[in-house]
Amino acid sequence: MWNLFLPDFYVNDIFEIDFDCLRKKNIKAILIDLDNTLIPWNSDEIDDKLIEWIRCGKEKGIKFCIVSNNLARRIMACSKKLGIPAVTGAFKPGKKIFLKGMEITGTSIKETAFVGDQLFTDVLGAKRIGMMAILVKPISKNEFFWTKIIRRIERRIIELMDRKGLLSKF
């Protein structure tokens, strides 16, 4: 059961993700959560550092696709600003949204990594389908009420994984 919640990598933020390391592992695409992974929750502010990170990944041959449970209008506006496609309207950790993201990137499960900030949606969803999962620390403490409750449980699980030496960095 632990394997469904154990990310392959755990990083402070997306900027610690090593594109060269991913390419060596035959990863050709990153499906990525938006809220509290790329930008603060419920924001649509895209900064130059994020745009540069996406550009660098593309230069290394990585394809991107935003995968979000959130409202399509805001997600699509962010997608356009970043110059990457997005999938909305499905429920993570369900498999459908991950499959749609891979269809858009044209990659297989073994060629795709998922990056997100939540164990119970992002990591669990990626692991259920057999995909590499990269967990990032949330950008902001500002988030949906229900998510704040779930975070308490997630923090305990992450602390336990850390104490047991199960969390890997790049």
Image (cartoon, rainbow, N blue to C red):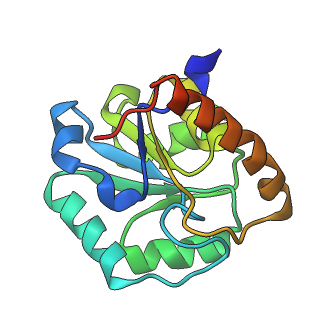
Counting labels gives 0
Residue plotted at (67% across, 68% down): 141
* Nearer to us in this view, 138 or 159: 159
Q: Residue furthest top?
A: 1
Q: Using residue 123 as the reference point, say whether residue 134 is left or right of it.
A: left
Q: Is residue 137 above or below residue 80?
A: above
Q: Residue furthest front?
A: 163
The location of residue 128, given as percent across then percent down, is: 59, 24
* Nearer to us in this view, 3 or 45: 3
Asked if residue 6 can be seen in this view, the reply is no
Asked if residue 37 can be seen in this view, the reply is yes
Residue plotted at (23% across, 69% down): 55
Residue plotted at (43% across, 55% down): 12
User: Residue 4 is drawn in which quadrant?
Assistant: top right
Where, quadrant-wise, is the N terminus in this rendering?
top right
The location of residue 14, given as percent across then percent down, is: 38, 58
Q: Using residue 108 as the reference point, say whether residue 38 is left or right of it.
A: right
* Nearer to us in this view, 62 or 19: 19
User: Residue 29 is drawn in which quadrant?
Assistant: top left
Q: Is residue 2 above or below residue 145?
A: above
Q: Is residue 142 above or below residue 3?
A: below
The location of residue 41, given as percent across then percent down, is: 65, 71
Where, quadrant-wise, is the C terminus in this rendering?
top left
User: Residue 123 is drawn in which quadrant?
Assistant: top right
Residue plotted at (72% across, 45% down): 91
